[in-house]
Amino acid sequence: MPIAIDIHSDVICPWCWIGKRRLEEALAGLAPGTAVVRWHAYQLNPGMPVGGM
């Protein structure tokens, strides 16, 4: 039975990107099918202007 990993992440957050890369590196060392990753979008700052801050 594979390990279920649910990720709640903001796609524009640099720390979330670093976490994604580290997770990918960790999963690369596992056999295929060992883990199932489910991604969920999450806005850390939903009030941010379209042009950024």
Image (spheres, helix red, strand yellow):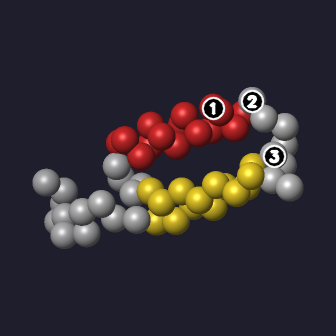
User: Which residue is nearer to you in this view: 47 or 6?
Assistant: 6
Per the image, the residue denoted by label 1 is 25
Q: Which residue type carries mark 1? A: Glu
Q: Secondary structure at mark 1?
A: helix
N-terminal-most mark, 2 or 3: 2
Per the image, the residue denoted by label 3 is 34
Q: Quadrant of residue 18?
A: top left
Per the image, the residue denoted by label 2 is 29
Which residue occupies 84% across, 43% down?
Answer: 32
Q: For the residues marked 1 and 2, what is the alpha-carbon distance in whole angstroms? A: 7 Å
Q: Secondary structure at mark 2?
A: loop
Q: Which residue type carries mark 3? A: Thr
Q: Which residue type carries mark 2? A: Gly
Q: For the residues marked 3 and 1, what is the alpha-carbon distance in whole angstroms? A: 14 Å
Badge number at residue 37? none
- Can residue 50 be seen from the camera position used here? no
Q: Quadrant of residue 29?
A: top right
Nearest to the eye among marks 3 and 1: give it. Answer: 3
Which residue occupies 63% across, 32% down?
Answer: 25
- Residue 47 in the image, given as x and y percentages of width and height: 19, 69
